[in-house]
C-alpha cells in the first residue's frame, strides 16, 4: 500500500471535555460525600438524562453491560428464559442475558441498516421467550413499529439496547417515549462518557423502584437495618462519574447536530468508492446520533479487511473491524448456550455472517470534523482500498 493519501489535519479528539467537566468534578469533590446515597450528582444526572430522553425514570449504573443485565432482571429474566438478540452486535447484548442463566437466541439483522430483523424475531419467539432486545446499531433505530407490534401481539417485552442511541428519535419520539425499557452505555468511546457508566430508562415508577433496590444490593434507599429486600448487586454509579456525565449531556445535542450534518457528506463520498456500501438509514429514525460511520466492502476477506483497518489508522482515520457475530465467539458458548451449532446459527443469520467478514466502522469523532475533512477521510479510504 502506498502512503500518498492521508489526512491533512487531525480529527477532533475524543472524549471532548473542558472547564465544564473540571468544575463538575470539583463540585462533586466539595460535597464531601462521593457515593449516590450521600451526594446529589447522581440524582441530578438521572433527572436530566430522563428529561432529555422523554422519560420520567432513569437509573444510573456502573456500566452499559450492567444496565442491560439489570433491565433483564427487573423484567423477570432468569435461568430457563430465552432472550432474542441480534446476532450482529457487541457481546454485551448476549452476555447480559447469559449472566442471568438465560439463553440468548441470536437472530439475523437487516442487511442495509444492520438492525435486528423483525421477521427473524417473530420466527424465534417461543414459549420460553421472556424478552426481545433490539440494538439501535450505530444510532440507527430499529424498526420500532414492527417490534412494538410483535411485543404487543406476543406479550414479550422489549428492552432497547440503546448503547449507540443517546439522543436518537423514532418518528419524532425519543427513546424514553417509546414505552419500553431502554439501556445506555457511557463507556469511553460512547456518544457521552465518564470512562464507564450506564443508565436504564424505565417506563413507570414501579419498575424504577425494582431496579433501584436491585442495583443497591437489594436495599431500598431508606434502609438502615440491612434488611435487603431482594437479591441484587452493587451497580451504583459514583458521584464523580455522574458530575462528568452532566457536563457531557450538555454537549450532546450540538454534537449530534454536527454529526447529522456531516454524515450525508461522508455517506455520499463513501458510496462513490468502488466496492463500498455504506450503512443505510431508515428515515423513520429522524434523529440519528451516529455512534459509528459504518460501511461494507462485500467480497473482502477478513485478513484483507484487518490490513485495511490498520493502514487507515496509520493514516489518521480511527477505523475498526466490525463486531463478530456473537455465536462466533468462545464466550458465547461458555454458559446457557442455545441447543444449536455454530453452522446452524450461521445458516439462519446470513447477513450477520457477511457483516462479520466485510464491515468496517469509523469512530463518531470523524463526524465531528469539518466538511473538508469528510472529503479527506473518503479519499484515504478510497486510496487504501485501491492499494490493498
Image (tube, rainbow, N blue to C red):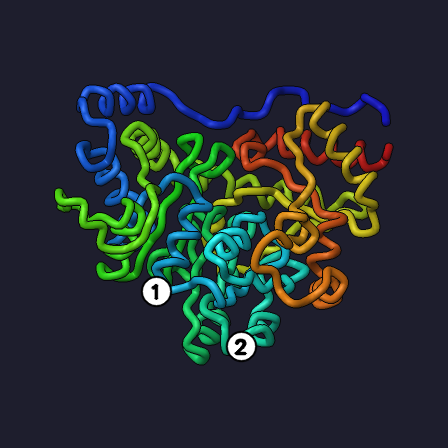
Q: Which mark is residue 28?
A: none
| Pick the front one: 299 or 343 | 343
Rendering quarter of residue 369: top right
Is residue 50 at all visible to an observer of this figure? Answer: no
Can you tell which mark lies on residue 179? 1
> Toward the viewer: 333 or 353?
333
Residue at position x 70%, y 36% in the image:
378
- 140, 186: nearer the viewer: 186
Left or right placement of residue 338 versus residue 171 in this view: right
Which residue in the protein does label 2 denote?
126
Foreground residue, 12 or 229? 229
Task: Tell me if label 1 and label 2 are in contact, CB under 8 Å.
Answer: no
Q: In the rendering, at what x and y percent does residue 261 appear?
A: 52, 41
Q: Nearer the viewer, mark 1 or mark 2?
A: 2
Callout 1: SS: loop
Identify the secondary structure beneath mark 2: loop
Residue 214 on image: x %, y % = 30, 51
Q: CA distance from mark 1 to mark 2?
A: 23 Å
Q: Is residue 358 left or right of residue 60?
A: right
Q: Residue furthest bottom?
A: 153
Binning the other alpha carbons within 10 Å of mark 2 as few (below 14), some (14 to 19) or many (20 upward) gives few
Looking at the picture, does residue 257 appear above or below residue 205?
above
Across and down, in percent, residue 256 comes to 45, 41
Q: Is residue 22 visible?
A: yes
Q: Residue at x 67, y 20 (%)?
A: 8
**Left or right: 147, with 278 as reference point:** left
Q: Residue at x 43, y 60 (%)?
A: 159
Amino acid at each position: 500500500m502506498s502512503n500518498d493519501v492521508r489526512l491533512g489535519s487531525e480529527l477532533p479528539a475524543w472524549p471532548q471535555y473542558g472547564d465544564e467537566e473540571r468544575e463538575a468534578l470539583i463540585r462533586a469533590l466539595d460535597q464531601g460525600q462521593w457515593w449516590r446515597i450521600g451526594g446529589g450528582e447522581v440524582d441530578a444526572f438521572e433527572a436530566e438524562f430522563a428529561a432529555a430522553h422523554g422519560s420520567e425514570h432513569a437509573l444510573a449504573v456502573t456500566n452499559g453491560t450492567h444496565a442491560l443485565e439489570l433491565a433483564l432482571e427487573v423484567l423477570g429474566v432468569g435461568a430457563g428464559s430465552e432472550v432474542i438478540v441480534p446476532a450482529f452486535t457487541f457481546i454485551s447484548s448476549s452476555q447480559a442475558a447469559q449472566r442471568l442463566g438465560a439463553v440468548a437466541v441470536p437472530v439475523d439483522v437487516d442487511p442495509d441498516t444492520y438492525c435486528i430483523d423483525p421477521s427473524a424475531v417473530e420466527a424465534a419467539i417461543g414459549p420460553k421467550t421472556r424478552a426481545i432486545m433490539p440494538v439501535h446499531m450505530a444510532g440507527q433505530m430499529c424498526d420500532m413499529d414492527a417490534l412494538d407490534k410483535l411485543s404487543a401481539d406476543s406479550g414479550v417485552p422489549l428492552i432497547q439496547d440503546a448503547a449507540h442511541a443517546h439522543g436518537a428519535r423514532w418518528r419524532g419520539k425519543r427513546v424514553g417515549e417509546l414505552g419500553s425499557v431502554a439501556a445506555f452505555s457511557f463507556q469511553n468511546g460512547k456518544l457521552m462518557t465518564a470512562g464507564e457508566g450506564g443508565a436504564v430508562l424505565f417506563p413507570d415508577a414501579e419498575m424504577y423502584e425494582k431496579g433501584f433496590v436491585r442495583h443497591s444490593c437489594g436495599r431500598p434507599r431508606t434502609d438502615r437495618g440491612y434488611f435487603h429486600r431482594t437479591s441484587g448487586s452493587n451497580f451504583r454509579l459514583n458521584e464523580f462519574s455522574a458530575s462528568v456525565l452532566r457536563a457531557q449531556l450538555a454537549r450532546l445535542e450540538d454534537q449530534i447536530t454536527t454529526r447529522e450534518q456531516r454524515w450525508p457528506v461522508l455517506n455520499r463520498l463513501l458510496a462513490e468508492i468502488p466496492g463500498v456500501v455504506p450503512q443505510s438509514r431508515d428515515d423513520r429514525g429522524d434523529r440519528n446520533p451516529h455512534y459509528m460511520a459504518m460501511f461494507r466492502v462485500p467480497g473482502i476477506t477478513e485478513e484483507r479487511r484487518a490490513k485495511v483497518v490498520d493502514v487507515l489508522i496509520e493514516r489518521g482515520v480511527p477505523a475498526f473491524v466490525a463486531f463478530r457475530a456473537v455465536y462466533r465467539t468462545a464466550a458465547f458458548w461458555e454458559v446457557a448456550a442455545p441447543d444449536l451449532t455454530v453452522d446452524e446459527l450461521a445458516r439462519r443469520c446470513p447477513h450477520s455472517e457477511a457483516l462479520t467478514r466485510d464491515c468496517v466502522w469509523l469512530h463518531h469523532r470523524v463526524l465531528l470534523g469539518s466538511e473538508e475533512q469528510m472529503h479527506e477521510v473518503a479519499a484515504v479510504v478510497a486510496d487504501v482500498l485501491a492499494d490493498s
